[in-house]
Amino acid sequence: MAIKAAKAPLLYVIGDRGAFKKDRDWLQAMVTVAESLMEHENVALQVRVQGSCSTSRFRRMQLARMRLDEFIENGLRVFLNGTVTQADRLNFKGVHLKQALLDETIHNPNHLEIATSTHSIESIQKTAEIGASFCVFGPVYNPKSKVAPAVGLDTLKLMTQQSPIDIVALGGITHERVSPCLKAGAQGVACISAVMRSSQPAKSINQLIQAAR
């Protein structure tokens, strides 16, 4: 059955494996975050595994899919940061494509909801062409998870004014920075550290959502 493009999430939590030393800690955090997200509307979770060999990466994707099965079946929007093929093999309902993969994805695969990472108006337009629900753009502020120059609110505003698709702002997001991003035209915010590195992820999620409403 075809999956139609949906509204961009107000909060998009990126469950990055790199935020943890051990798989078990990451997987437990993913469950904790998923439980909290289930209490809110218009939210989504991303499974992201990077920096390892393809076999290890896929195994970790598989472990995350198994732990999140109950939440996915109960309606939580969960995107696999990977390829359409990987999302198919693991029975995810959503896939998050890196900008580099956009040229390889000529059309919407119908059975998957799509989100993308973008860094230019060209990639944003490509995202719209393939029928994606939304794109993530940034880093708006200096991110805590990696070293990368911030593009700033003015650039975010310029992108949202030109974009034919909803944009979710990423990069250094805290609850104090949610409102400026939304005022710049973003339809939601995405974060890693603000939730995945928090000692109280449920509290952090509540603060971010309250700031967005």
Image (cartoon, helix red, strand yellow):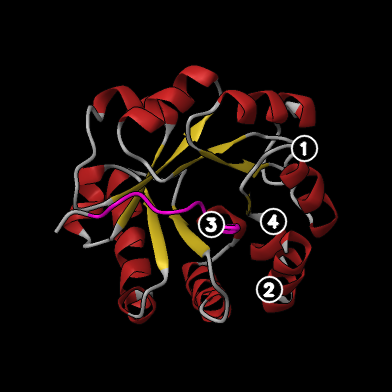
Say whether disc 1 or disc 2 marks the residue closer to the N-terminus: 1
Task: Identify the magenta region.
Answer: 3-14
Q: Is residue 125 above or below residue 168?
A: above
Residue 97's image quarter? top left
Circles 3 and 2, Cβ within 8 Å, touching? The answer is no
Quote the CA–CA distance across marks 1 and 2. 21 Å
Q: Is residue 135 above or below residue 66?
A: above
**In the rendered structure, which amino acid carries the disc numbered 1?**
Tyr
- Pinpoint residue 171: horizontal percent, then vertical percent: 69, 42
**In the rendered structure, which amino acid carries the disc numbered 4?**
Ser
Residue that appears at 35% across and 80% down? 74
Residue extending farthest to the right is: 176
Say whether disc 4 or disc 2 marks the residue closer to the N-terminus: 4
| Residue at mark 4 | 193
- Pinpoint residue 211: horizontal percent, then vertical percent: 78, 62
| Residue at mark 3 | 9
**In the rendered structure, which amino acid carries the disc numbered 3?**
Pro
At numbered mark 1, what does the secondary structure look like: helix, strand or loop? Answer: loop
For the C terminus, which image quadrant? bottom right
Q: Which mark is residue 141?
A: 1
Q: Is residue 79 left or right of residue 62?
A: right
**In the rendered structure, which amino acid carries the disc numbered 2?**
Pro
| Residue at mark 2 | 201
Quote the CA–CA distance across marks 4 and 2. 10 Å
Q: Which mark is residue 78?
A: none
Quote the CA–CA distance across marks 3 and 4. 18 Å
Q: Is residue 79 above or below residue 209?
A: above
